[in-house]
Image (cartoon, rainbow, N blue to C red):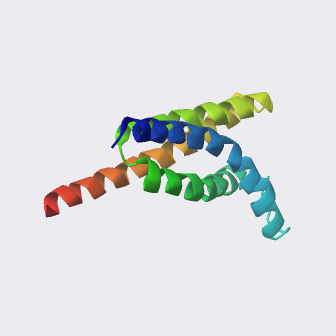
Amino acid sequence: MSKFKVVLSWVGIILLGLAHGLLEDLMFIRVLVEYIPASWDLTGDIFFIFTVPLAQLMTFAITGTLAWRFLGLRHLPKLVTFWGCWIFARSAFLTFAQNPIGDIAIYLGWITLWCFLVGLYARNKHQSRVGAG
């Protein structure tokens, strides 16, 4: 891989990680709020156990797929960079929006879980390739 492509993939990982931290709110506002029945209280008791993870997963389906397919997210250094950028963007946005520290910690916990699961998947996929090869 040429040096330019390597640099471009790292820049892409960073940009997607940062964008992901902001896209979650768009998924919440533009998708979940508009298309889930009004009888569901998306901001009530189920917010941190349903709404937040669902918005994160919907966004991760876009940014994570792009990063996995084109930028090498399956490699641990890139996954950790993506996770760090996502954490930074999300915590900066939530702090700017004056969310309580406890709420921010819940968001960051979900983010860490998703990236941990992606790391486990990448490791398992790599081991199955090595075992088969």
Total numbered labels: 0
Viewed as shown, does residue 127 lie left or right of 2? left
Q: Residue at x 58, y 44 (%)?
A: 16
User: Which residue is the extreme one toward the right?
Assistant: 38
* Residue drawn at (51%, 41%) of the image: 13
Image-quadrant location for residue 22: top right
Foreground of the two, 71 or 92: 71
Q: Quadrant of the N terminus?
A: top left
Q: Is residue 85 visible?
A: yes
Image x and y of residue 92, in percent:
69, 29
Q: Position of residue 6 (x, y in %)?
A: 40, 38
Vertical side of 133 occupied by 9: above or below: above
Indicate left or right for 82 with 96 as reference: left
Residue 45 is at least partly visible in this image? no
| Camera-side residue of 47 and 117 | 117
Residue 51, position as x, y percentages in the image: 69, 56
Relative vertical location of residue 82 with respect to residue 71 in this rendering, above or below? above
Q: Percent x, y for residue 4?
A: 43, 37
Residue found 66% across the figure and 36% down from its top: 90
User: Could you tell me which quadrant the C terminus lies in?
Assistant: bottom left
Q: Is residue 75 left or right of residue 103?
A: left
Residue sitting at x 79%, y 65% = 40
Is 36 positioned to the left or the right of 48 in the image?
Answer: right
